[in-house]
Image: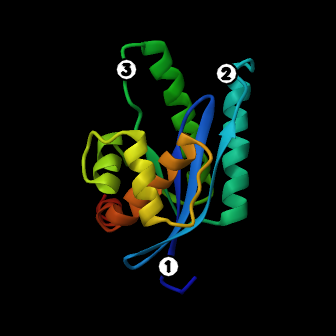
Amino acid sequence: MTSRAIRILGIDPGLRRTGWGVIDSDGNRLIYVGCGSIEAKETLPLSDRLCVIHDGLAKVLDEFAPVEAAVEQTFVNKDGAATLKLGQARGVAMLVPARFGLTVAEYAPNQVKKTVVGAGHADKNQIRVMLGILLPKAAPKSADAADALAIAITHAHHRQSVVLRIAAS
């Protein structure tokens, strides 16, 4: 990794599986570092599932030492209770990197798809195909890990405007 490379953690929050992906962004080059998912058993109480997400993300941050993080914004659906629970997982996904001193950017699902695939309504398969082109060494074992890598790539492409916006506020 050269001195100007930026290590980015992408997080796709979920109560069953929270995907994570780490890349290095060096100018226009994207380098795959690692990815995976943190799995919390559905039989656990909500508080315990949130602890599993917290501890798993803290371990990823310890191991890979990213300097910036990005999280996908919550997709609001018709089931208000499910959306609220997902929001709690997302809160943990934003809290952990913030506690490690990282700035945490947020991206809408359509912005992630548009950045990675070129179309805001791309499907999961199209994202996987583009990941294979953009990060040839990446082989995510789950859709959540693939989505997290896509979120990290989105941040790599949009980080300058996000960093300037945060500095201005």
Disc 3, SS: loop
How is the rendered protein coloured?
Answer: rainbow
Disc 2, SS: helix
State the quadrant of the N terminus.
bottom right
Residue at 50% over, 54% down: 149
Q: Which residue is mark 2?
A: 46
For residue 14, what is the image quadrant? top right
| Dot 3 crowding, Cα within 10 Å, few <14, some 14–19, many 20+ | few
- Whether residue 104 appears in this view of the structure is no
Which badge, 2 or 3, is on the more N-terminal residue? 2
Which badge, 1 or 3, is on the more N-terminal residue? 1
In the image shown, does 86 or 98 lie closer to the viewer? 86
In the image shown, does 105 or 135 lie closer to the viewer? 135
Q: Residue furthest bottom?
A: 3
Q: Which residue is mark 1?
A: 5
Which badge, 2 or 1, is on the more N-terminal residue? 1
Q: Which residue is mark 3?
A: 77
Q: Where is residue 45? Give x, y as percent.
A: 72, 18
| Dot 1 crowding, Cα within 10 Å, few <14, some 14–19, many 20+ | some
Q: Residue furthest left?
A: 119
